[in-house]
Amino acid sequence: MLALNLPGYSHKIITRNGKGYIFDVLRKKYVALTPEEWVRQHFVHFLIEHKGYPAGLLANEVQVMLNGTKKRCDTVLYGRSLNPRMIVEYKAPEIEITQSVFDQITRYNMVLKVDYLIVTNGIRHYCCRIDYPSKTYAFLPDIPAFPDLG
């Protein structure tokens, strides 16, 4: 798999029927090893091990209903009161982060109304904080540590 702009970690990969699977620490099972999943697992470990995010407040593949259609958010961070606080959208490393990717995560946020949105392809990471009272958003220079989320 491709090297990412994220710290490495001790991942667990197995092969079944000629296909690779990687262990998802949040779902506690092996999942198909796709380029996007490679990014997801690295980014989740980055959040937990380097940014202090509690694994118990993170969930992968969170289903939301959007205009009568089932959609899945790649990763959602919940607050201690279990309200959604952050959505993370992953793309494979070769996929460019474009306006359509931001449009996708914004649609999910119409349902969840979180404070932070992150989009990453493992190489480039974008994080913005949404200010609902002023109806604005600001891109942050870095991914915030969990204690800094407020």
Image (cartoon, helix red, strand yellow):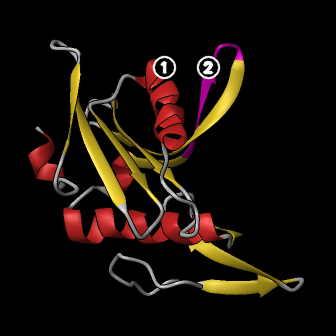
- Kindly identify the amino acid type of the residue bearing the numbered disc 1: Val
Expressed as whole percent of the image width and height from the top left, the position of residue 56 reads 37, 52
Q: Is residue 140 above or below residue 41?
A: above
Q: Main secondary structure of the magenta part?
A: strand
Expressed as whole percent of the image width and height from the top left, the position of residue 36 reads 60, 64
- Identify the residue position indicated by label 2 in the image: 66
Picture quadrant of residue 72: top right
The numbered disc on residue 111 is: 1
Expressed as whole percent of the image width and height from the top left, the position of residue 58 reads 40, 49
> Over which residues does the magenta segment extend?
61-68
- Circle 1: is it few (<14), some (14-19), or many (20+) Cα within 10 Å? few
- Locate residue 131 relative to residue 75 in the image: left or right: left
67 part of magenta stretch = yes
On the rendered image, what quadrant is the N terminus found in? bottom right
Q: Is residue 95 above or below residue 61?
A: below
Please report the residue visible at 70 percent of the width from the left and 14 percent of the height from the top.
Answer: 68
- Circle 2: is it few (<14), some (14-19), or many (20+) Cα within 10 Å? some
Mark 2: which secondary structure? strand
